[in-house]
Amino acid sequence: MTIFRGIGQIMLQGNAATGMLILAGIFYGSVLMGIAAFIAAACGAITAKLLRYDRKELETGLYCFSPALAGAAFILFFKPVLIVWGFIAMASAATAVVQHFFIMKKIPVFTFPFVLVTWAMLYLVKYFCPAIMVGTASTTVGVSHNFLFAIRGFGQAIFQSNVLSGSVFFIAIFISSPAAAIYGLAGAIVSAIFSFCFFVPVGDVAMGLFSYNAVLCAIAFAGNKIEDAVCALISVLLSASIGLLMFKHNLPQLTFPFVIASFITWGLKHRFGIEK
């Protein structure tokens, strides 16, 4: 169950049933990506066990979610040749070690280990082994389907652009926390409207590419108090702003806007004494 809890932690839900549904959604979108995410999560768990990290932290999936994201990302960015599967295993171990470092420092970095390791691999592969890079595919969405951008935002958190995977992710989160699912939906809508105001291409917004970081931010601060809603809104707007800046400079966002926006919002929350 550790691996499934870890996959659930991608959406900030340490629930095994949620993790199983999320993995099913990934498999629906891409069998190879599903296999890579599962293997990577397992490698992260094995690394944590071999290095004798805290058992409770391991069992809650804290050493699996960043590796799982890295595994899925590698299938998105690289061709699934043998060496890439080796990269997935090594990157999974590396993300688990980086995650442990920040846990020991008591710094809430969310998915930053995944971002850091994936950025490093993208740079190294681009300059030393460009032949295994996957070309950028352009995907368009009909205007009549633009209203589904919020659901696609859930899917894009794990590189899934299809509506069914996004719907499965939403349901998986709802099972664990209805409030988190609703917050995520609202965050996706707010971020999309914000992006429209800055003339982001309609197709990109419709695909959920400017919603998924907001989904994660909103889920991170979901709660039943007005303070929670305020923090969620701040983090969503921050993540949207960071995402737009990275988009302008053609930088791979991954979940970096979510990480930075959440970190800043947590800092403001503690600075002004806004506690749950």
Image: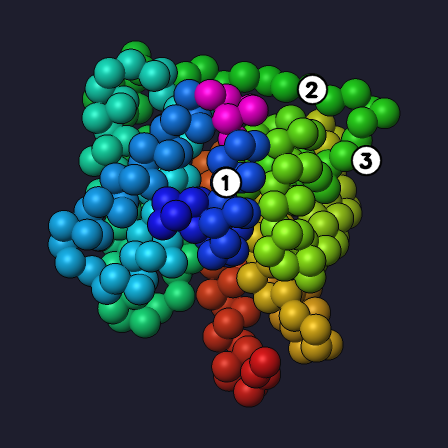
For marks 3 and 2, the one nearer the N-term is 2
Q: Position of residue 156 (x, y in %)?
A: 58, 36
Measured Cα–Cα span from mark 1 to mark 3: 27 Å
Q: Earlier in the sequence, mark 1 or mark 3?
A: 1
Q: Is residue 127 above or below residue 155?
A: above
Res 140 label: 2
Q: Amino acid at mark 3?
A: Phe
Q: CA distance from mark 3 to mark 2?
A: 14 Å
Segment colored magenta: 26-31
Instruction: Specify the amino acid type for callout 1.
Output: Met
Disc 1 to disc 3: CB gap under 8 Å? no
Residue sitting at 72 percent across and 55 percent down?
A: 182
Residue at which label 1 appears: 20
How far apart marks 1 and 2 lie (CA) works out to 29 Å
Q: Could you tell me residue 167's position as x and y percent?
A: 68, 37
Residue type at mark 2: give it.
Thr
- Seen as rendered, the residue at the extreme bottom is 273
Residue assigned mark 3: 147
Q: Main secondary structure of the magenta part?
A: helix
Tag 3 near tag 2, CB within 8 Å: no
